[in-house]
Image (cartoon, rainbow, N blue to C red):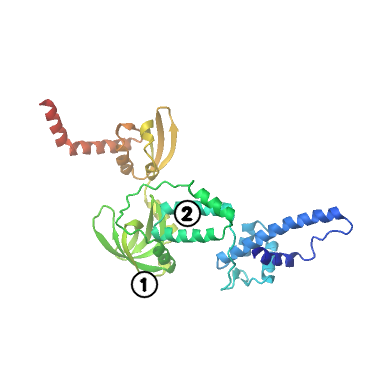
Amino acid sequence: MHEIFLKSAYEQAISGCCTAGRGDETALENKEAVRTFRFMNRIDRLTAILIHLQSKRLVKAEELASRFDISLRTVYRDVKALMEAGVPIGSEAGVGYFIVDGYHLPPVMFSQEEAGAMLLAGKLVEQMTDRSIRDAFESALTKIKSVLNDPGREHLESLYSHIEVRPSISDEMQEFPNRFLTDLQKAVVEKRAVDMEYMARYRDELTQRVVEPIGLYYYGNAWHLIAWCRVRNDYRDFRVDRISKLTPTDSIFSDHNHLSLQEYVQTVMRNHGELHEAVVLFDKRTARYLGERKYQHGFVTETDLGDKVQMTFLTSFLPSLGRWLVTYGTGVEIVSPPELREVIQAHVAELVEHYKPALAALAGEKIS
């Protein structure tokens, strides 16, 4: 259906072109081959332009030219061809093109590469989002499969069992619903305050908060809601998997009074303090067990030194890095900075003091 529809648009755009000279059969065949090649390219581009127009409220001609690597003149000609074929495209001078409300292109076919990319994204969604997003994506992927041809479906089914994403190490509290990302997305777009019950880290009690969401930010293997807290009268960072209950309110706020998500992140980075470079030696056996944790502590590079691995970290908080390194005992050696070595020595001293009674009792048993 798409090919018939867009062929009509193409034929109107090139009527009178690509005709062969009479009496020259070879020239006719060559021109027909060129015409077929140009027709397929044009069909693909017209389809892509139409899909692109439907994906946004307004699209500038310059955006289309850049997206499809064509001239503005070609953009004008392609849009005119679509309009002459019956696509209701409107335009505003100096603003852009738009599809009139109510018009939708029938379902399009996906290539194997596109379907494979969606499958790969789905595997990431399974491990990096919550139940609300997983359900929505699974529904979308089912719709994609429904418009694939038989070879495409077989390709996807065969590929599915050959791709896995390792679950992130997380201390998510399983008793929490972890299904609010979809509701929070709506609240961000609608600029709607939400009422929520939240359990802060290291506290064993729920707090009631009314917040104005400004964005969702993924870091540290978890999604975080960045919002203006009306209780604290300041911006706060809430881990989404620690929200036990969430209810959208009728209160609509203005985003003119808030930082954007990008501005908030930049402000936090500026206020986070100076980054310290730490160089650490791990024995090979210990290095194998670091896993994803090293990235959470600012891992940058590593060098194989034979029986040891030298790793470089950038961190703004040496005590956190020090506490983590202590857990690997004698498998770790600090190269620099001296401050990190002092941090670890202080942690070890605390541990010795804490376990001194047990150590004394153990020593007494050995003497007797």
Quarter of the figure with the N terminus: bottom right
Q: Visible in this render: residue 128?
A: yes
Q: Is residue 275 above or below residue 352?
A: below
In the rendered image, residue 190, in percent from the top left (x then y), is placed at 43, 69
Q: Is residue 182 left or right of residue 359?
A: right
**Residue found farthest to the right:** 23
Q: Is residue 218 left or right of residue 100?
A: left
Q: Which residue is mark 1?
A: 251
Q: Is residue 167 above or below residue 368?
A: below
Q: Residue at x 40, y 27 (%)?
A: 307
In the rendered image, residue 167, in percent from the top left (x then y), is placed at 39, 48
Q: Classify 10 Å Cα crowding around label 1: few (below 14), some (14-19), many (20 and above).
A: few
In the depicted view, which residue is nearer to us: 252 or 104? 104
In the rendered image, residue 46, in percent from the top left (x then y), is placed at 66, 62
Callout 1: helix, strand or loop?
strand
Quarter of the figure with the C terminus: top left
Q: Visible in this render: residue 239?
A: no
Q: Earlier in the sequence, mark 1 or mark 2?
A: 2
Determine contact: label 1, label 2, CB under 8 Å.
no
**Residue found farthest to the top:** 367
Q: Which residue is mark 2?
A: 122
**Residue found farthest to the left:** 368
Q: Residue at x 59, y 63 (%)?
A: 51
Residue 308, picture quadrant: top left
In the rendered image, residue 170, in percent from the top left (x then y), is placed at 35, 49
CA–CA distance in space, label 1 to label 2: 34 Å
In the depicted view, which residue is nearer to us: 351 or 181? 181
Q: Classify 10 Å Cα crowding around label 2: few (below 14), some (14-19), many (20 and above).
A: some
